[in-house]
Amino acid sequence: MSATRPPPPTHAPLTQFPFSDGELLVGGVPLSQLAMQVGSTPFYAYDRQAITQRVALLRAQLPASIHLHYAIKANPLPELVRHLGQLVDGLDVASAGELGKAIDAGVSAQHISFAGPGKRDEELEAAVAAGVLLNVESFREARALADISARNGKPARIAVRVNPDFELKSSGMKMGGGPKQFGVDAEQVPALLDEIGQIGLAFEGFHIFAGSQNLRADAIIEAQHLSYQLALRLAAHAPGPVKSLNLGGGFGIPYFPGEQRLELAPIAEVLQGIADDAGRNLPGARLVLELGRYLVGEAGIYVTRVVDRKQSRGLTYLVVDGGLHHHLAASGNFGQVIRKNYPVAIYPQNGQRNASAAQAERVTVVGPLCTPLDVLGDQIECNGRAEIGDFVVLFQSGAYGASASPAAFLSHPAVKEVLV
């Protein structure tokens, strides 16, 4: 008797985009109508209400004393940054360009922080002039800021970015633990703090970011505990009181089959305990969570159209007008070791599928680029025969999409982006 095979894993349910009359709605607008408003495919569309609801979910579950910051690198679209700037407590930037977008969004410099391992002198100058909090990532940066502060007549606001002696387990990208280009190794931080006190910078706290894209609450909880305990130990060497402690983020979203959504409740419980202890041992310190993809990733879709159908030795290919030059992550070339499919769906261009085309088929979705890497969906199941002109939609595309892709590759047209 043969053993029964378990069913293949499926994607986590997608509930952020409703349907009406057979059409996907983005911001309440039917997909076919939205495509006409944008004017052409490919394009990214971000649902304003879905972003608002995600922030509201966090506000409802996390302790009220936790400050939420949006990491602009996840999606720097100016309209989206302005929208989130009204919802969160601060913005985190990683370049002078992002700093400009944060300021243009109307967010006070008091609530903007700047991280990154290779800040140029002109970026440091701009940040000090703006009055934002700079996360110092090396002894050289601290000394450069001392010179800039002396020239400007005011001390730079700084926090020390710490490379901890642990990592965020099971994270998609590990940004702490072991040798890293980020921050200053924890064992070197006391010496840096002593130098900061001597050169007269305005010390405000610590930034400890161990990793990102994690779906395991227990791993995030462990990292937050360890980060807080490390901050307490380092605070004993600080030249002034800790006013800000950025505990990083790491909150992930489900991209691939078999992945489950992150549980917030146990994280919230532990953060409450940390907040209570900080009230006693780091009085007056702001506890910050720095989140990017968790705020915007599930609120975005990438929309392309089928421009050709091809049969090749038993396989059906749908060639679409978008590809890895717009959405590198979905192609599997942005950190994946083994390529996996994002959630992909195909919708008729007029919102209705012909009854004669209702038979399911298996297809591979590829872009127009002259490279075998340009694959957006490998052997996916369609609920009907896809035709030229139909929409191919990639979900979970609100973060690290257009801005993280090689847009100039092969000189195809730039992708459009809309906040709906």
Image (cartoon, rainbow, N blue to C red):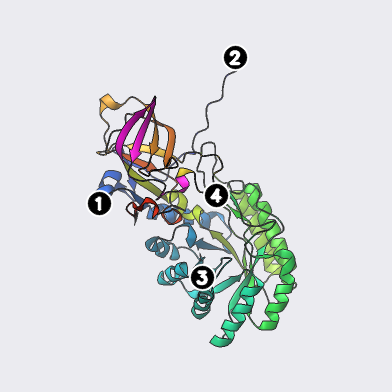
Q: How crowded is mark 1: few (under 14 residues within 10 Å), some or many (20 or more)?
A: few
- Residue 328 sits inside the magenta stretch: yes
Where is residue 402? Give x, y as percent: 41, 54
Where is residue 95? Give x, y as percent: 50, 67
Question: In the rendered image, which residue does mark 2 sit on?
Answer: 2
Task: Please name the amino acid that badge 2 sits on.
Answer: Ser
> Residues in magenta?
306-330
Disc 4 + disc 2, Cβ < 8 Å: no
Mark-to-mark CA distance, 3 and 2: 61 Å
Q: Earlier in the sequence, mark 2 or mark 1?
A: 2
Mark-to-mark CA distance, 2 and 1: 54 Å
Q: Earlier in the sequence, mark 4 or mark 2?
A: 2
Mark-to-mark CA distance, 4 and 2: 38 Å
Task: Please name the amino acid that badge 1 sits on.
Answer: Gly
Residue 112: image tag: 3
Secondary structure category for the residue under label 1: loop
Task: Please name the amino acid that badge 4 sits on.
Answer: Gly
Where is residue 220? Give x, y as percent: 63, 52
Q: Earlier in the sequence, mark 1 or mark 4?
A: 1
Q: Which of marks 3 and 4 is nearer the N terminus?
A: 3
Q: Is residue 50 above or below residue 366?
A: below
Residue at image x 55%, y 61%? 290
Question: In the rendered image, which residue does mark 4 sit on?
Answer: 252
Residue at image x 50%, y 61%? 70
Mark-to-mark CA distance, 1 and 4: 33 Å
Can I make out residue 153 in this image?
no
